[in-house]
Image: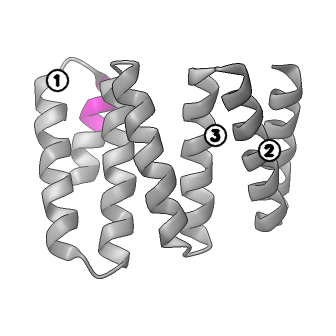
Amino acid sequence: VQEAQCLEHLGSLQSYLCNTQASVRSWVDSLNLRRELGHANGLKKCLEQLCILYLSLEDYARVSDSAEELLEVARQQQDPEGEAHALILSAKCQRNLGGAHRAIETLQICLKLCKTHSRSEQLLVREAECH
């Protein structure tokens, strides 16, 4: 686990230094290590960071893949906040790939999820993002 954390710190530092490709490699290495260890919370963190990095690189196919996996992990953990974040990332990707109608449908699913769990402050923020 410490090796994965070191890779994540390295990835964050590389991102801060605008070395996005190197940051992606560090986060991918951490993701793979966390998969081997079966560390689900770490998986979510890695997938979220990779989605953000891939969005900045405009690599929407990878954003889509990472967001889909993030959604699956969040659902397995019964984590509505993680689900909402994955849905928003998917919608951003869909919009950028020209699928505005699909992006709207995804955001509507996200809004419904947020309203179901309206006690969460984080989900209120996600709900605002959907609008």
Q: What is the number of the mark on residue 21?
A: none
- Look at the image and say whether residue 104 sits in the magenta stretch: no
| Residue at 38% from the left image edge and 42% from the top image edge | 85
> Which tag, 3 or 2, sits closer to the chain's start?
2
Q: What is the number of the mark on residue 46?
A: 3
**Badge 1 amino acid:** Ser
Residue 12 in the image: state x and y as whole percent. 78, 46
Residue sitting farthest toward the bottom: 98
| Residue at 29% from the left image edge and 82% from the top image edge | 98
Tag 3's secondary structure? helix
Asked if 130 appears above or below 43 in the picture, the reply is: below
Give the crowd class for mark 3: few <14, some 14-19, many >=20 residues within 10 Å: many
Give the Cα separation between the discs numbered 3 and 2.
Answer: 9 Å
Q: Quadrant of the N terminus?
A: top right
| Residue at 45% from the left image edge and 30% from the top image edge | 73
Q: What is the number of the mark on residue 118?
A: 1
Quadrant of residue 30 in the image?
top right
Q: Quadrant of the C terminus?
A: bottom left
Quadrant of residue 126 in the image?
top left
Tag 1's secondary structure? loop
- 3 vs 35, nearest the viewer: 35
**Magenta span of residues:** 121-125
Query: Is residue 18 visible to us here?
Result: no
> Which tag, 1 or 3, sits closer to the chain's start?
3
**Badge 2 amino acid:** Asp
**Badge 3 amino acid:** Cys
Q: Horizontally, is 95 left or right of 22 in the view?
A: left
Give the crowd class for mark 2: few <14, some 14-19, many >=20 residues within 10 Å: some
Residue 54 in the image: state x and y as whole percent. 59, 64
Residue sitting farthest toward the front: 36
> Which tag, 1 or 2, sits closer to the chain's start?
2
Q: What is the number of the mark on residue 29?
A: 2
